Image (spheres, grey):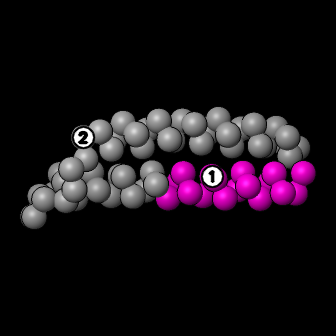
Amino acid sequence: MDSKNKLIQLQADLAKYKAKLAEKMKNFHGVKHESSLSELRYSEVMVLRDIVRSLEKEIEKLKNDV
């Protein structure tokens, strides 16, 4: 896969994961004490944030290389 196609794919993935993160954040009100569901939602939010950050870094790196 060449750089331009990879960049397009990463941007599409970024948009998808940003939408997922926004949806999860609508119902997220922090971690409630000793609530496993709350902790699970927190974990999902943190994973999605990390995915978004990683994609943004990779996109920036590709843009600088092109």
Q: Residue drawn at (47%, 35%), measured in percent from left and top?
A: 19
Which residue is disc 1 drawn over?
55
Mark 1: which amino acid? Leu
Q: Quadrant of residue 21?
A: top left
Q: Position of residue 46 (x, y in %)?
A: 39, 58
Mark 2: which amino acid? Asn
Task: Tell me if I can see residue 40 in this picture.
Answer: no
Q: Position of residue 40 (x, y in %)?
A: 25, 54
Q: Residue drawn at (63%, 52%), measured in percent from left and top?
A: 55
Q: Position of residue 39 (x, y in %)?
A: 22, 59
Q: Is residue 32 left or right of residue 61?
A: left
Q: Quadrant of residue 20?
A: top left
Which residue is disc 2 drawn over?
27
Q: Is residue 49 above or below residue 19?
A: below
Please report whichever mark, 2 or 1, sits nearer to the chain's N-terminal start. Answer: 2
Badge 2 element: loop
